[in-house]
Image (spheres, rainbow, N blue to C red):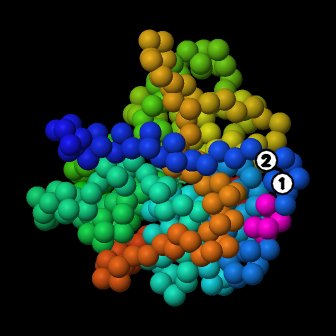
Amino acid sequence: MNGMLDDPVVRARTVPLTAEVEREHVTRSEDERAALIERIKGLLERENAVLVAHYYTDPEIQALADETGGTVSDSLEMARFGSAHPAQTLVVAGVRFMGETAKILNPEKRVLMPTLEATCSLDLGCPADEFAAFCDQYPDRTVVVYANTSAAVKARADWVVTSSIALDVVEYLDDRGEKILWAPDRHLGRYIERETGADMVMWQGSCIVHDEFRARELHKLKAAYPEAGVLVHPESPADVIEMADVVGSTTQLIRGARELPNDTFIVATDRGIFHKMQQAAPGKRFIDAPTGGAGATCRSCAHCPWMAMNALDNLANTLEFGHNEVTVPEDIRVEALRSVQRMVDFASESRVQVHGTGNA
Ligand code: 13P
Ligand code: SF4
């Protein structure tokens, strides 16, 4: 491997090409599609399974989760919902860390995913051994990691957070005089540091989707739609976050779309979220925040290539054959449970609002 690819962040950014070509593209008639959906509904019942989907998955998967008593939600609510639901099998339509978090919290349940290949650039860019060495340099700091990490990284952490709860947790720790080691998303880390004034050292990871949003182009778009509200996920660059009317988790952005008075919104997050935004705020108009820009050789589609790997076909096969079961080695799971459970407990104690299925 060449020297550049030894860098975890560079390596993480090269992988989506592989992920994209692995996506199954199947053309089928309306009747075939309806039959497949009915088959999945039957399999969910047969397997005593519930579908736990993220807002970035395809609208047809989100609709299936809604119709079958599952949830469509952000990563914190996905974790909470899976634990609270009585089903013996959780089918997590999202990316790998979401399936692992479900398993960490629910060792007695079977956790399946449509594909185990669906990962995340933040997870890939933060290998557990390199992260442990980084932590060793700062033994006096409280280690706070974003949920978009492997179980092994969570096992090394004191706290796990998602974007809906990160500010509250760091504020709480800062009030107690604790210094923070934050990983892996540098943009979310900077945003929290600026908002809380906490003393933070940071791992330099990023999300390949959100990192592509461009403030210069956003200014131009905003000039064309001066009345538009700007909704930004905090994995986006700082100068994009600065332009936001709402900065927050996917659920918080959907709530912003519904509650702000604007009729038009420019949205800096994965475009899969438009499905729920349209349901939450019918009649409003949603526009993708720009990526790339003049002179760019390539424009991002603002869609996570790994989320896009979740499809009806692999979902049906997973349920039919019990493929793609998520496993976490027990010693790692037990260690990771400490930091994940802290997040879940903090959320319920502080009553941070967690909702799914567009009821943001
Ligand atoms: P949320 O927890 O806000 O849904 O974010 C998950 C994620 O992966 C965003 O890219
Ligand atoms: Fe990871 Fe970015 Fe995909 Fe979210 S959108 S799962 S942060 S690569």
Q: Which residue is farthest left?
A: 137
Q: Amino acid at mark 1?
A: Glu
Residue projecting furthest to the bottom: 108
Q: Main secondary structure of the magenta part?
A: helix
Residue pictured at 48% horizontal, 22% vertical: 298
Q: Position of residue 91 (x, y in %)?
A: 61, 70
| Residue 345 within the segment the image draws in magenta | no
Asked if residue 159 is positioned above or below residue 221 in the image, the reply reads: below
Is 177 rendered above or below residue 58? below
Q: Nearer the viewer, residue 43 or 122?
A: 43
Q: Residues within 10 Å of mark 1 (few under 14, many from 20)?
A: few
Residue hosting label 1: 32
- Residue at the top extreme of this rendering: 295
Q: Position of residue 59 (x, y in %)?
A: 72, 49
Image spot of residue 26 (x, y percent) = 69, 47
Give the magenta-colored segment's residue range. Answer: 36-41
- Give the spatial CA distance, label 1 vs label 2: 6 Å
Left or right of 98? Residue 149 is: left
- Label placed on residue 28: 2
> What residue is at 48 percent from the left and 12 percent from the top?
294
The residue lying at 59 percent from left, 76 percent from top is 322
Q: Is residue 160 visible?
A: yes
Secondary-structure class at tag 1: helix
**What is the three-letter code of the residue carrying label 2?**
Arg
> On the rendered image, what quadrant is the N terminus found in?
top left
Residue 42 placement (x, y as % from top left): 79, 74
Q: Are marks 1 and 2 in contact (CB under 8 Å)?
A: yes
Displayed quadrant of residue 267: top right
Query: Is 268 or 46 nearer to us in this picture?
Result: 46
Ligand 2 within 8 Å, label 2 CB: no
Between 96 and 360, the one nearer to me in the picture: 96
* Residue 285, picture quadrant: top right
